[in-house]
Image: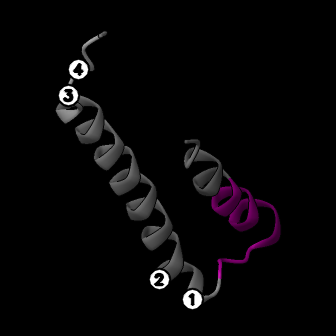
Amino acid sequence: MDYSSLLWAIAAGWWFFGTLPADTTWVGAPLIVASGLFIAWREHRRHINRPKEVAA
């Protein structure tokens, strides 16, 4: 997951064009990052709790 590109895009937009993202971006970006982190955490937990299959 490469969320640093979002930060670089905001910095470049501010530096070169003097603009910042819309208010909805400030609300939506953390939701997207939090969702991605939650999915990564959930998949990590599923991998830990997965029972080992026994070959018959």
Mark whose residue sits in front, 4 or 1: 4
Of label 1 and label 3, which has the lower sequence position? 1
Mark whose residue sits in front, 3 or 2: 3
Residue 52's label in the rendered image is: 4
Q: Nearer the viewer, residue 23 or 13?
A: 23
Distance from Cα at disc 4 to Cα at disc 3: 4 Å
Q: Which residue is mark 2?
A: 27
> Which portion, as a residue range, is magenta?
9-21
Residue pushed farthest front? 56
In x, y percent, where is residue 34?
38, 62
Q: Which residue is mark 3?
A: 51
Task: Give the amino acid at mark 2.
Answer: Val
At horizontal 23% and vertical 40% (from top left) the residue drawn is 45
The reply to whether the C-beta atoms of the residues labelled 4 and 2 are less than 8 Å apart is no
Q: Residues within 10 Å of mark 3 (few under 14, many from 20)?
A: few
At horizontal 38% and vertical 52% (from top left) the residue drawn is 37
The reply to whether the C-beta atoms of the residues labelled 2 and 1 are less than 8 Å apart is yes
In x, y percent, where is residue 3?
55, 49
SS assignment at label 1: helix
Q: Residues within 10 Å of mark 2 (few under 14, many from 20)?
A: few
Distance from Cα at disc 3 to Cα at disc 2: 39 Å
